[in-house]
Amino acid sequence: MTDMLPLTVAKRREHDSLGEIDVDADAYYAAQTARAFANFQISGIPIGHYAVFIRALAFVKKAAALANLELGDLDRKKADAIVAACDDIAGGKLADQFVLDVFQGGAGTSTNMNVNEVVANLALEHLGLPKGSFDVIHPNNDVNLSQSTNDVYPTAIRLALLLSYDSLSNELAGIADAFEAKAAEFADILKLGRTQLQDAVPMTLGQEFAAFAVTLREDILRLEEAARLLKEINLGGTAIGTGITADPRYAALAIKKLAEVSSVDVVPALDFVEACWDTGAFVLFSGTIKRTAVKLSKISNDLRLLSSGPRGGFGEINLPPMQPGSSIMPGKVNPVIPEVVNQVAFQVIGADLVVTLAAEAGQLQLNAFEPVIVFNLLQSITLLTNAVRTLREKCIAGITANEERCKEHLEAGTALATALTSLIGYEKAAEMAKEILRSGRTMRALLDESNTLSADLLEQVLDTKALTRPSRFRNQPANGK
């Protein structure tokens, strides 16, 4: 048997300011991307994995081309070819050509050049010319005209976040709806409320689930508030915000064009020098995502605890069984869906710390660490969106209540003692609670025996449904005065 010869890949010779380098003949990127690809073999995750970020960069390049055309700095033939290439890329074409690792040095310059080179070669293809004909359309001179990585890259990050966070908001609205549906279903199921894992006061299972919905709806509003700050962009500020190499009219026009092509109402930052290095909007947005993750993890903790057992734990609700829970214990079913949400939350919380540290590490007129910021933000949005959808579809929708277990815990506990404090005083109520725990008798039995309350007031105090809302009990003298 003859040994197979290794396949050879055809190459073309490219050059940049560092010299010549070979690039795959069919690649749409060129020399600078090839060098960066060789330099940054870190995570194995290419920037093209985040399609919304590539789409945002294509929108920025299109807006710049349209602005430069209107200002007379780019001729119609070049502008039309660049715009056509940007439209193709924004539509998902050539996603595999954005090959650079999400972890990269250079403050995003490698990513900007990856886009510039792909746009240039695709534009050349629209003109019927071979790749690398950069004397006709050049990645820097034409595609990057009036731009710098330092205004393109942060603008694209903001735009990508604005284009993608709606997916998370929509899933949060969906799971809030699911919790509200369960709240209505469980509205009449009385149970024991707990604080610090100890018996507290009566509530309904519906109230417990309604609170989950309320807290998540709050975070939809907080995300919208944080997103408003992302709309302030520095496109046109070029290298450090002074606008060097750009027409004085370019910034306002390019931002106007970007709003048109992206359908996102971006606006100029108040000060482009400040906006070139300030990553505060990313920190706030990341913190808001973390806040949501913390809440979802707490809810998942509650679901696991309330469903624990099923015999040796709380067992007040049943989570839908999704898979066998043990390789050794027959019949065991684990709360795997809340568990995966917990793990996603841990990841998002850690990502927020990365964003915070990267923002703090900026120096002078630029933050060099925006690549790790955009990676962590987009990853967190993706992970949390998928986790919320999974929790809604595979867990919340199938939860059922163990009404008898809820009743059993309520009646066996000391929760009703709280209602007695305004009638017999805190100390006597505490003594009665201790007697319940010591003897195992119920509150009703102890009150019947003590003759402490009139019959009608006793019925009010023992009406657990009434104790799930504001109630005022006062003991009246026997003569009614």
Image (cartoon, helix red, strand yellow):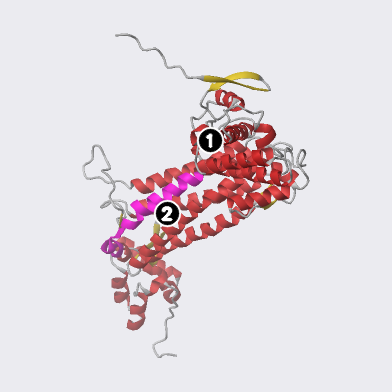
* Residue 325 placement (x, y as % from top left): 28, 43
* Residue 223 placement (x, y as % from top left): 55, 55
Amino acid on which disc 2 is placed: Ile
- The mark that comes first in sequence, 2 or 1, is 1
Q: Is residue 200 magenta?
A: no
Say whether residue 234 is visible. Answer: no
Horizontal side of 405 relative to 198 (left or right) equals left
Q: Secondary structure at mark 2?
A: helix
Q: Looking at the rendering, which quadrant does residue 472 occupy? A: bottom left
Q: Nearer the viewer, mark 2 or mark 1?
A: 1
Amino acid on which disc 1 is placed: Ile
Q: Residues within 10 Å of mark 2 (few under 14, many from 20)?
A: some
Q: Which residue is mark 2?
A: 299
Asked if residue 178 is positioned above or below residue 64 in the image, the reply reads below
Q: Residues within 10 Å of mark 1 (few under 14, many from 20)?
A: many
Mark 2 vs mark 1, CA separation in Å: 33 Å
Main structural element of the magenta stretch: helix, strand or loop?
helix
The stretch of residues the image draws in magenta is: 380-408
Q: Which residue is mark 1?
A: 47
